[in-house]
């Protein structure tokens, strides 16, 4: 007896209908307890692994109470309560529709699950039949209908384009039989080989696929006050890294490393090595990094690139000071316009009256 529970609607043949019929008869026979030990299949070894088989039996006398000895498909003859039912109705599923093929969802009843048009089960069929088992569960795994992959348009045959070719070239044309395609390198490099190809009727290409010229990077601009940590070359291959270092007292501004890209460009412009700045004040304190200090107390009288230096300026009318900041940029640091360098005499004779030493103006004093 054929127990295949899957069929495709499109392929519903007479033999399949008769299979269904057989199944229904089997179901009826089960309910009617017409099975004897000879026509019910033996309990399949391993059946318990997939479902819970009720106690096996030879006749009703082996089962207690309301149980009867009925054929429970792969579990063979088992003690089941024929009145018990399987879950019904089933939860709604948007991709499929379930319908009972028997009047009630009781033992041995059949349930048909049909996928929505355009959806199929894992095995490619679009319908399946489930049977109510002695363990009160529908047979088989819960059917899941998923969107069917649209088959290739019939009659449109193409020549294969390997992934490596697709990754290397932009292809103009659809690679169908009897047509030509044109290649261009995605990297922008020149093509080595034929730029055009023809898809023959036996779905093979007339010529081998071409190649792209290997791109090379030109030497990057030199970095003043910096070193290149790499062998200097006239051309660099794709993936080559150039690392940079700056000379002592210079600060790296930009990437520490640049890489030759597959299109022959560098991943970034080379960095700059930025110089320190001389503090352009001598006889007045300044604020550097939050600390107010005399310029001669600062090591070498220099600040690094990017450092802010805050100067004290005198209020034009009042005896108070306000601040103005300037930033060191690659060796250049100017005093703010308002800053006036004290004279040597002022510095020597009236150190307490120096602009950086007098009272700070009230917020309202400064416009
Ligand atoms: C395909 O057809 C071409 C030309 O008709 C022929 O040269 C080639 O050998 C064929 N290739 C295969 C794999 O059949
Ligand atoms: C090379 O590729 C990079 C990153 O993909 C891009 O930013 C750059 O503009 C390209 N250079 C050229 C010359 O096409
Ligand atoms: C300097 O000042 C600017 C703007 O106020 C700020 O963005 C920068 O972080 C400061 N630099 C330092 C080194 O404190």
Image (tube, rainbow, N blue to C red):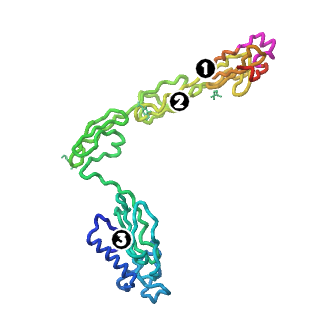
134 or 39: nearer the viewer: 134
> Taking 238 as reference, is 324 left or right?
right
Q: Residue 148: image x %, image y %?
A: 35, 57
Q: Is residue 193 magenta?
A: no
Name the mark nearer the viewer: 3 or 2: 3
Q: Under tag 2, what secondary structure? A: strand
Residue annotated with mark 1: 331
Region of the chain picked out in magenta, as a range: 340-356
Q: Distance between the Cα atoms at labels 1 and 3? A: 85 Å
Q: Residue 367: image x %, image y %?
A: 70, 19
Q: Distance between the Cα atoms at labels 2 and 1? A: 20 Å
Residue drawn where x is 71% and y is 24% of the image: 287
**Vertical relation: 308 (above or below) 66:** above
Residue drawn where x is 28% and y is 38% of the image: 182
Name the mark nearer the viewer: 2 or 1: 1
> Taking 313 as reference, is 37 left or right?
left
Quarter holding the N terminus is bottom left
Q: Distance between the Cα atoms at labels 3 and 2? A: 70 Å
User: Mark 1 or 3 closer to N-term?
Assistant: 3
Q: Which mark is residue 244?
A: 2
């Amino acid at each position: 007896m054929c127990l295949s529970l899957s069929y495709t609607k499109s392929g519903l043949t007479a033999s399949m209908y008769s299979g269904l019929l057989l199944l229904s008869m089997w179901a009826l026979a089960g309910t009617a307890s017409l099975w004897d030990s000879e026509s019910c299949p033996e309990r399949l070894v391993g059946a318990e692994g997939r479902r819970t088989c009720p106690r096996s039996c030879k006749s009703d006398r082996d089962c207690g109470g309301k149980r009867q000895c009925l054929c429970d498909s792969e579990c063979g003859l088992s003690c089941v309560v024929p009145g018990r039912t399987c879950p019904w109705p089933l939860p709604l599923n948007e991709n499929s529709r379930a319908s009972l093929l028997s009047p009630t969802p009781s033992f041995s009843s059949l349930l048909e699950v049909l996928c929505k048009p355009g959806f199929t089960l894992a095995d490619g069929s679009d319908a399946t039949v489930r049977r109510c088992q002695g363990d009160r569960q529908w047979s088989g795994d819960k059917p899941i209908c998923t969107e069917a992959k649209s088959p290739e348009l019939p009659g449109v045959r193409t020549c294969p384009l390997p992934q490596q070719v697709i990754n290397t070239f932009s292809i103009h044309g659809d690679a169908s039989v009897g047509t030509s395609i044109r290649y261009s390198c995605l990297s922008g490099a020149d093509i080595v080989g034929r730029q055009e190809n023809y898809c023959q009727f036996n779905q093979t290409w007339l010529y081998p696929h071409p190649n792209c010229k290997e791109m090379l990077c030109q030497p990057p601009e030199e970095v003043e006050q910096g070193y290149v940590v790499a062998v200097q070359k006239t051309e660099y291959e794709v993936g080559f890294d150039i690392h940079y270092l700056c000379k002592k007292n210079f600060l790296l501004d930009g990437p520490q490393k640049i890489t030759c890209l597959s299109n022959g460009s560098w991943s970034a412009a080379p960095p700059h090595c930025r110089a320190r700045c001389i503090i352009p004040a001598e006889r007045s304190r300044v604020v550097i990094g939050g600390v107010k200090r005399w310029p001669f107390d600062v090591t070498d009288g220099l600040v690094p690139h990017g450092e802010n230096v805050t100067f004290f300026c005198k209020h034009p009318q009042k005896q108070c000071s306000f601040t103005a900041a300037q930033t060191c940029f690659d060796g250049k640091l100017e005093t703010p316009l308002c800053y006036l360098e004290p004279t040597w005499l002022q510095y020597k004779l009236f150190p307490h009256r120096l602009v950086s030493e007098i009272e700070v103006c009230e917020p309202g004093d400064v416009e």
